[in-house]
Amino acid sequence: MPVVARISAKAHPRCGISALEVLVAFTLLSSVLALSTQLIVQHGRLLKVQRDYRMALDELSNQLERIGALPDGDRSEALQKLTPSTFVAARLPGAKLHGALDALDLGQRLTLRLSWNEPQRVAAPVVMTAWILPRTENPPRGADEE
C-alpha cells in the first residue's frame, strides 16, 4: 500500500494573505507616506530659510569689513550710499540694507541691518555690529621689541 503523506496545518503555515491584512498594511503605508511628505516639504522650507540667513550674514560681514576699513571721514558717506550687493539683491527679494554709525567713548559703533521680503525678516532684520577703535599713529611696542 502506498504511503500517503498528510499535510498538517502545523507543518506548513498558510501561504495566502487575507484582505484585512492587506487593508491594514495599505493604511499604515499611506499614513507613513503622508507624514513623511509633509516633513520633507517642511525640511525644504527650513533649508531655504537657513540658506538665506547665512547669505545675509555673509553680506553684513563683508559690508562691515569694507566700511570699517575706510578712513574716518568716508564712513558716513558710504553709509548713505549703502546698498546690498547684486548677488544678494538677486537672491533675497526686496533686500534693504541700513546702517548707523554711533560715536562712543572708545571709538565708533557701526551697526548694519539687512531685511528682505519675508515675514520674519521684515519684523526682525538680521543685525550685525562692529566697533571701530581710533587709529593710533605709533602702535605700542611689544616686550620682545625692546
Image (cartoon, helix red, strand yellow):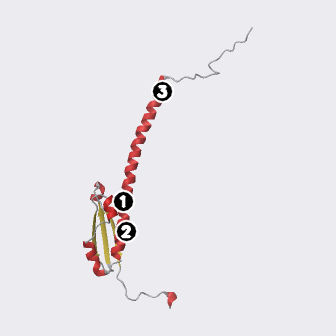
Q: Amino acid at mark 2?
A: Ser
Please state if 15 lies on the left or on the right of 80 as rendered: right
User: Disc 1 designates what residue?
Assistant: 53
Q: Residue at x 32, y 60 (%)?
A: 90
Within the image, what quadrant is residue 29 found in?
top left
Between marks 3 and 1, how big is the CA–CA gap?
46 Å
Q: Amino acid at mark 1?
A: Tyr
Q: Secondary structure at mark 3?
A: helix
Q: Residue at x 41, y 45 (%)?
A: 40
Looking at the image, residue 95 lies above or below residue 28:
below
User: Disc 2 designates what residue?
Assistant: 61
Please state if 20 lies on the left or on the right of 85 as rendered: right
Q: Residue at x 45, y 27 (%)?
A: 23
Q: Amino acid at mark 3?
A: Val
Query: What is the number of the mark on residue 22?
Result: 3
Looking at the image, residue 104 lies above or below residue 24:
below
